[in-house]
Amino acid sequence: MDTTLTGWRPLLRRQWPIAGALGFMLLVELSYAASSRNGEVLLLAWLADALVALIAVVAPRRPVESALIVVCTELGLTLALRYTGVNHWDAVSGMGPVETAAGMALIATVVRQASPPRATVAVAGIVFSGIVSGVVRPGGNLFDTLASVAVPGMLLLLSIGTGVYFRARDADRSRTVRSAINSAQQDERLALARELHDVVAHHVTGIVVQAQAAQVVAEQDPLAAQRVLPYIERAGVDALTAMRSLVSSLRDSQMVGEVGASDAATTDPVADIRKVVDDAAAAGLPVYLTLDLPRTLSVELARSVLRVVQESLTNTQKHAVGLTAVRVAVSTADEMVHIRVTDDGKGSSAAPAGGSGGYGLVGMRERVELLGGRFSAGPRLSGGWEVHAWLPVREATR
């Protein structure tokens, strides 16, 4: 695992309780050392304890390395106290209160952050230095009584248990964060897929349909190809512009669906819908528009209304044959925007232009339901196809 805190501010926010507790213990121990007749030796021991406390505070940056430094410091202090014969201020089997508290904090940090093999080595080193201190130091009483063994053992288990608890909590938090990131990435991919399908496929479908129509009538009317070339050129330019805008939004880390994510949609929904309908009419669709829509819709709602109309007309171009009329009606009533697109064509048995991935209806339904609306699409009883969508105005502007 070996997670580390690389910044000092996050480290201090996490470690300030330990730093405060150890700092208070150091002040008490310093006053004890100053009043003792072995003050010089105890002052050196206090400096070693201060080093151990400092390492325990910054241990999350390098937990295993910090543990090894503490082990060496403890062993060195034990040898010095043994040589001078001075009894350290014992708290637990020859170890002072600062050493005991710092060791517990360090064990918890190592178990929490280091991989199990490295944590095992580090904890074993700390336990070994504690045993040596309890046996070798003057006043050390480890193994003398049951209590002298039980108390350090309980503190050791408490430290390990604390580390295991925080390790499990960190793992849960990491899984939650990864899940949230994956969900956000999936939502962004779906939004991008809808934009590509609705914007680019709309223009490309028009190009393919016009090219196919020109091929059909080319023998009877050789000038047909020349008449459709301007439309093909304009649709190709629009498709390239939309693709560049989508790529630019990704490079600029702009969420797909925000203002500017596609210049096929502006802040004027009425003008956008009229342009889409005019383009469809220029492509040969006998489309009729009824529009009663305010110009002050929210960005999300306006974009969704435009995409539903745009994708419905694209599907009509791709699938319907024998058309005489395509009717688009967009109106607002009872705090709802109602979209209705109908045609009287017949479904084609041949493969549609550019193939069909089956994502058009899925994308429209997703857009509508994300804003709390309702969507339906299917064949009409009198023939043809119809698309209905209801989008709440208030819900969409939240």
Image (cartoon, helix red, strand yellow):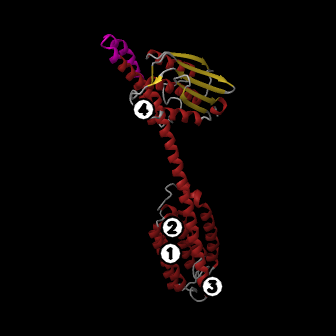
Which x, y percent locates residue 203?
Answer: 42, 24
Query: Based on the displayed image, in which of its 4 quarters is residue 155 positioned?
Result: bottom right
SS at circle 1: helix
Q: Distance between the Cα atoms at labels 3 and 2?
A: 26 Å
Of tags 2 and 4, the one toward the viewer is 4
Q: Which residue was labeled with disc 2?
A: 110
Q: What is the number of the mark on residue 126?
A: 1
SS at circle 2: helix
Position of residue 370 relative to residue 15, above or below, is above
| CB atoms of marks 2 and 1 within 8 Å | yes
SS at circle 3: helix
Q: Which three-letter amino acid code belongs to the residue tagged 4?
A: Ser
Pointer 4 local density, CA inside 10 Å: few below 14, some 14–19, many at least 20: few
The disc, 3 or 1, on the residue closer to the chain's N-terminal end is 1
Q: Distance between the Cα atoms at labels 3 and 1?
A: 20 Å
The disc, 1 or 4, on the residue closer to the chain's N-terminal end is 1
Residue found at x 45% / y 73%: 121
Q: Which three-letter amino acid code belongs to the residue tagged 2?
A: Val
Residue closer to the observer: 254 or 62: 254
Q: Which residue was labeled with disc 4?
A: 356
Which x, y percent locates residue 154?
Answer: 60, 77
User: Horizontally, is 288 left or right of 350 in the view?
Assistant: right
Magenta stretch bounds: 214-238
Q: Is residue 215 found inside the magenta-colored segment of the image?
A: yes
